[in-house]
Image (cartoon, helix red, strand yellow):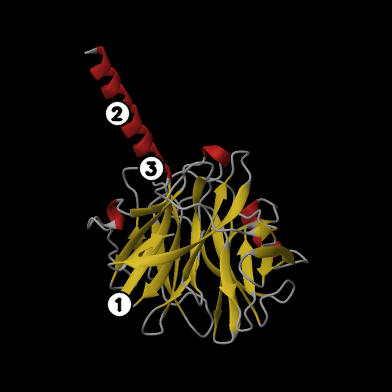
Amino acid sequence: MVALKSLLVHALLAATSTASSLLKRQYPGPGRVTGDTNVHDPSVVKTPAGLYILAHTGDNVSLKTSTDRTAWKNAGAVFPNGAPWTTTYTGGSKNLWAPDISYRNGRYYLYYSASTFGSSRSAIFLATSSTGLSGSWTNQGLVIESTTSSNWNAIDPNLIVDAQGRWWLSFGSFWSGLKMIPLDPNTGKRSGSDLISIASRPSNGGAIEAPYITRRGNWYYLWASFDKCCNGAASTYRVMVGRSTSVTGPFVDKAGNQMMSGGGTQVMASHGSIHGPGHQAVFTDADADVLVYHYYANDGQAFLGINLIRYDNDWPVVY
């Protein structure tokens, strides 16, 4: 009987260990990157010449470049001479958040946020450039702003051009969730007064932000970050996704739950020494769609994460 109990205990411990190992292997580690990889809120565009330009949160918006998607180097600031038009929203800080960089119609577009932590007195601005490099950007002015009485927050912008060529800007953080507005493709600025709700977390303190919409075939995918960012290794950020046949939704997760009601299929979360992965962006490269994000190491530093994406039954899987 004692021997039987011992066998049962060992079997239980082995099963627990196996389950734990499987859980740890549920999400892939970040792909190899080298050089200057301390980033927060990354967004990447590949130029026609093959250069990768990464924009991320930093003083006057920070830039990095890479020729191979692996080795990265600092490339200065978008606005090396400062961005005084933003300080009304930042309380005087130079730190500008969550830039979204893309290449359209022969020009680079950069939407970026100005705010202070925990406040909905925020603004999203647009800048354009012919090269995408430091010092080449021209500020095009305010796109949208929110106030302390708004029940939404004008940060974390992302531009999506739909199958019909229409331009849309998604954005949002906490409060009543993620929003979308139509843009004029001739200017990149707001067109009309529509404010469309695309996702929220009414039962979770509103902890959703960083929308990013991509299109593949007949599907639009809404990527978002749930839970707590910006708390070092204690961060609980995780990457979620839903899909829709319409750019404006409704977006649903794999189980059929609407993202407007807190739904979302989890595709990346903390594992091992990778803490709080999130504020994701996606771009298409020659080999695959590519997910870029930041995560925190055990010491609390934020680093660049890069993984590839495959699609199983039209649902994205990160590998």
Q: Are marks 3 and 1 in contact (CB under 8 Å)?
A: no
Instruction: Give the SS element for disc 1.
Output: loop
Please name which of the two marks, 2 or 1, marks the residue nearer to the observer. 2
Instruction: Give the SS element for disc 2.
Output: helix
Please state which of residues 300 and 11 is positioned toward the viewer in this rendering. Answer: 11
Name the residue located 66 percent from the left edge and 50 percent from the top edge.
91
Residue that label 2 marks: 11
Measure how far apart labels 2 and 1 are at the Cα level: 48 Å
Residue that label 1 marks: 218
* Whole-percent x, y for residue 281 in the image: 50, 63
Please name which of the two marks, 2 or 3, marks the residue nearer to the observer. 2
Name the residue located 31 percent from the left edge and 73 percent from the top edge.
219
Residue that label 3 marks: 23
Please state which of residues 197 and 314 is positioned toward the viewer in this rendering. Answer: 314
Measure how far apart labels 3 and 1 are at the Cα level: 32 Å
**Side (left or right) of 145 relative to 17:** right
**Residue that protrudes farthest toward the top in the picture:** 2
Q: Is 115 placed above or below 284 here?
A: above
